[in-house]
């Protein structure tokens, strides 16, 4: 049940390479909270997925979802 939600949310993810250090920043504009920063785009995507999963679990645990 959560996998389709996560996949749909990640389709809205936006990534940019930061000019200061060349790392990648990723976020999901419709969801305030989860974001990621990593040395490569692939690592940033992985980190954002993990951040989103953690955000969902936190929200459910604290009654915010």
Image (cartoon, rainbow, N blue to C red):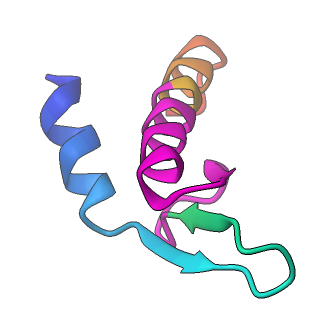
Q: Examine the structure image and report whether residue 38 is included in the region drawn in magenta.
A: yes
Camera-nearest residue between 25 and 61: 25
Query: Where, quadrant-wise, is the N terminus in this rendering?
Result: top left
Which residue is located at x 59 percent, y 22 percent? 63
Region rendered in magenta: 28-53
Camera-nearest residue between 23 and 31: 23
Quarter of the figure with residue 62: top right
Camera-nearest residue between 62 and 10: 10
Residue farthest bottom in this picture: 19
Reply above or below: 60 against 10: above
Which residue is located at x 28 percent, y 40 percent? 6
Residue 38 horizontal/vertical position (percent): 65, 51
Camera-nearest residue between 29 and 45: 45
Which residue is located at x 57 percent, y 36 percent? 51
Q: Examine the structure image and report whether residue 63 is included in the region drawn in magenta.
A: no
Which residue is located at x 48 percent, y 64 percent? 28
């Amino acid at each position: 049940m959560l996998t389709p939600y996560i996949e749909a949310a990640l389709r809205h993810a936006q990534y940019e390479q930061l000019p200061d250090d060349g790392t990648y920043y990723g976020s999901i504009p419709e969801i305030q909270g989860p974001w990621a920063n990593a040395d490569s785009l692939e690592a940033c995507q992985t980190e954002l997925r993990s951040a989103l999963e953690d955000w969902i679990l936190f929200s459910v645990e604290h009654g915010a979802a």
